[in-house]
Amino acid sequence: MVTIAVTAEPGDEPRFAASPETVKKLAGLGCTVKIASGAGSRSRFSDAQLAAQGATIVPTAAEALAGADILLKVRRPDAAEIAQLKPGAIVAAIVDPYGDRGALEALAATKASIFAMELMPRITRAQSMDVLSSQANLAGYKAVVDAAAMFEQAMPMMMTAAGTVPAAKCFVMGAGVAGLQAIATARRLGAQVSATDVRPAAKEQVASLGAKFVAVEDDEFKQAQTAAGYAKPMSAEYQKKQAELVAAHIKNQDIVITTALIPGRPAPRLITKEMVEGMKAGAVIIDLAAERGGNCELTKPGEIVDHNGVRISGLLNLAGMIPVNASSLYAKNLYAFLELLIDKKEKALNVNWDDEIVKGTLLAKDGVLVHAIFAPAKAA
Ligand code: NAD
């Protein structure tokens, strides 16, 4: 029998790592799911709903953690929480593997097997476990909804007897998972949408959503995608050409949604202060890259700033602002991952440490940070 603990997240994180649906599925795998009372409430999952699907609701987090084999979290738990689990227990969370190294080492020192869900390999078999996709998709949607609310004009073109309201012009920078959802959402709201990316594969995807693709399409662009499907950092020369193009395009935009990221690095700077100063008063920028420093020079993570009438939102955790969906999808990602680690017949943990998905996400084991991302630092 495998015991799984799910406890509440820190105050600024409304998401939760289990849902009524996944509790039922985990019970179906033969697991006992212990949930601290009230822990799911910010995602609107009540104790009663979770219990009805088979969860064991316990009064405190300590009781949920005591002797559990697995801990499921949204954010990185602290070492004190992990210490209450069974020795060598499994922890799965969005761990922020490129963040504070000292804190990661403290986690490793607990000797738990810690899985960083954001390192999930982007292979077909792991699609249902891909937390970056499930959360980025929601963030892309929410960015446009927020922009529409902040923008003091209508989004669609309206032809009325009193005159014509023009369609808002929306520019999406970075056409990955979040960007493509932002394009689709802005189109649904009636905006005239354009988008940019450095990966050539994005061109067709942008066009298929009915948006105009705007990019510097030189030789470097043709090779900008890594084998893992991510963007490479671009050369100074490319960045200069890109900046010139963006500066000219952004002047006429009403809404700009930025989503550009490069794994393990600060977000690329795509919008300078000067470019913002060239924009129309009333324009809105939603910077989804704020968590990693922002794509816009003026972004302040966690804040909305007003620069000469252009408002720039660096609000964090947009997926968390629609916690019901975000938690449901995240919990499903975790369930799909646990299916890989649990032997259904034996109803026991059975981890194949050589599995590509296990290897790709395993951050720490037996007291050591084992993931390949730590290899260069080790060598140094
Ligand atoms: P991401 O969050 O790392 O980055 C967002 C976007 O920013 C990417 O499209 C990236 O190319 C772009 N970007 C980076 N630097 C830029 C720059 N200087 N200028 C403009 N744009 C820049 O990416 P993501 O959303 O995680 O998606 C990356 C790719 O992986 C996409 O092609 C996506 O479809 C693919 N993907 C594959 C799977 C799978 O096969 N299982 C799952 C999810 C995503």
Image: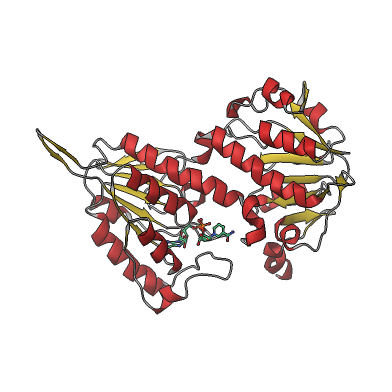
> Residue 327, image x and y in percent?
60, 37
The residue located at (41%, 54%) in the rendering is 295
What residue sits 73% from the left and 66% below the top? 378
Q: Left or right? Give the position of 79 relative to 97.
A: right
Q: Is residue 310 left or right of residue 105?
A: left
Compared to residue 216, the image places residue 91 above or below, namely above
Depth order, front residue of 339/6: 339
* In this rendering, position of residue 226 left or right of residue 306: right
Q: Foreground: 102 or 376? A: 376
- In this view, 23 is above or below 230: above
In the image, farthest residue toward the bottom: 219
**Residue 85, x across and y down, in percent:** 84, 38
Q: Is residue 244 rendered to the left or right of residue 101?
A: left
Identify the image quadrant of residue 360: bottom right
- The residue lying at 38 percent from left, 59 percent from top is 208
Question: Eyeballing the image, is 366 above or below 153?
Answer: below
The answer to whether residue 314 shows anywhere in this view is: no
In this view, 297 is above or below 86: below
* Quarter of the C terminus within the rendering: bottom right
